[in-house]
Amino acid sequence: MAAAAVDSAMEVVPALAEEAAPEVAGLSCLVNLPGEVLEYILCCGSLTAADIGRVSSTCRRLRELCQSSGKVWKEQFRVRWPSLMKHYSPTDYVNWLEEYKVRQKAGLEARKIVASFSKRFFSEHVPCNGFSDIENLEGPEIFFEDELVCILNMEGRKALTWKYYAKKILYYLRQQKILNNLKAFLQQPDDYESYLEGAVYIDQYCNPLSDISLKDIQAQIDSIVELVCKTLRGINSRHPSLAFKAGESSMIVEIELQSQVLDAMNYVLYDQLKFQGNRMDYYNALNLYMHQVLIRRTGIPISMSLLYLTIARQLGVPLEPVNFPSHFLLRWCQGAEGATLDIFDYIYIDAFGKGKQLTVKECEYLIGQHVTAALYGVVNVKKVLQRMVGNLLSLGKREGIDQSYQLLRDSLDLYLAMYPDQVQLLLLQARLYFHLGIWPEKVLDILQHIQTLDPGQHGAVGYLVQHTLEHIERKKEEVGVEVKLRSDEKHRDVCYSIGLIMKHKRYGYNCVIYGWDPTCMMGHEWIRNMNVHSLPHGHHQPFYNVLVEDGSCRYAAQENLEYNVEPQEISHPDVGRYFSEFTGTHYIPNAELEIRYPEDLEFVYETVQNIYSAKKENIDE
């Protein structure tokens, strides 16, 4: 009977929503149903927020069921924005109708700003103050972030420009929040020893679009601790570590009991879970991100040591970090508590080397050199993070293919957050921004700060100031958009159009054209270095700006390009800057690029029809 009543009511609800009048036939049938059944109907998922609003205006009973803090509006919110529910406690009073309105308004405002970015910043990198519109929006930041995530998760190959700028905005917002959290973390007293928390902030900052949290990483480590406890129980069923409650621990005094914990840890980590030092791909930034260390079960000495240290301390073994040169280590005290100790009263643990326990002499043999006693000393959280970021900085300097130098930029931000007056790193940051042609105003601010800190840098600072000011003046002198018409006589030799998927005849890479010139527009030095004169047509031929599948941007001669008979998406971070959609055969330019090449799209359609349709006909035959 209940099922029949529900089915009957489901037929009545749309009529109520449409007519919104108490006189509608079937109303009495609906309102006489038990409250639980009515609530079930209204939460069934087929009714929109507008439907609920209309239904609630039909009579007092339905209005009471649809109260703003009730289950019906909570379900509307949950179905529309499920990822936001984790921010609400089950015990909190929430006006779900008001939350729905605020979230919807935030979404509309966020989309409006994202839509404006392409027009405002197509010709330049988004400036430092370009995100001020988002920062100044009223309402919870998590609502704006959630809308940006919704844009990024839009299905299909459309809205590429929206996704491109939504990603940039989300990247910026999250990094700003993480950097503020890190700075607050660094203000903690020196005895605050949450090494894992600091490492997670670094991980989050370098991967702001990933869902990384200390809570999740700690949960994964807790699961490893449980496995260690299971093994430890087989070694010593009365071991005091087994009595520790989750989130609580104390340090064990007896060396033998500590040794049992380390034996169990080594078995679980290296034999059971197969963690190992990444010797094959040592210089990979993933080795420094704690969430990746746990996923891939590999890392470098410092990240493996932090994992080992965290587990050991949770089980009562007071290991300490040692900033040993070339190879981060942990130390394990063997001396009596309160005694005067030297470096020989410790055993040193190599977490990268499967938890191997080393003497002082073996530590020196590990790195192939003698070191002073000071380098065996314990270091605080800030020094550990400095070393982690220093490693990332070194990797960032090695970047070759990533022309945005994102890792170098991120690691510089992190290092300068810890040590804001490092002159050489400030100078490197200014040079990097200058090289990338971005944020000239910020470059001047950095250079002024350097000059205040070290007047001796006057030469380097003066050179950059002069050229940065020239860059700013050139930008001011730039006139309107340059429009290139295929029908123009001087463009008669241009064979290809923006949006076409091409293949390089010599190097074999796949790419998409996003711009062209009737002849090579690069300077004499570039032409000489690229050996352009050796080409049959030299520099007196069309050249094309292309986005390459490896993430690079190149300038290719027409004679070196050919149609890609098997077109595919080009995985390049800047595709969305120029194109709004991938059709399967070509890219469609966004509004800003089409303004600059207004006649190209027609040529693209003709080319696609001639090249790919002909191919399809041959296959069909």
Image: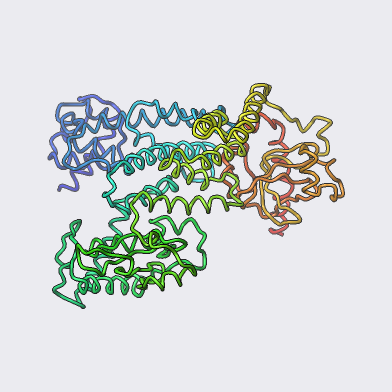
Q: For this rendering, which residue is in front, 502 or 70?
A: 502
Question: Which quarter of the picture shows residue 218?
Answer: bottom left
Measured as percent of width and height from the top left, residue 268 is found at 31, 72
Residue for point 78% across, 38% down = 523
Rendered position, 330 above or below 504: below
Residue 153 in view, yes or no: no
In this rendering, position of residue 304 left or right of residue 440: left
What's the colour scheme? rainbow
Q: Which quadrant is the C terminus positioned in?
A: bottom right
Q: Position of residue 604 (x, y in %)?
A: 70, 40
Q: Residue at x 58, y 42 (%)?
A: 574
Against 61, residue 202 (above or below) is below
Q: Residue furthest front?
A: 340
Question: Taking the image as drawn, is residue 268 in sight?
Answer: yes
Whether residue 286 is situated above or below residue 498 in the rendered picture: below
User: Which residue lies at the image location 49% right of the left edge and 28% below the top edge?
Assistant: 129
Residue 57: image location, x then y, percent? 22, 25
Q: Could you say where residue 557 lies in the image, as x and y percent from the top left?
A: 78, 46
Q: Which of 316 and 59 is in front in this view?
A: 316
Q: Residue at 68% x, 36% y: name it.
A: 601
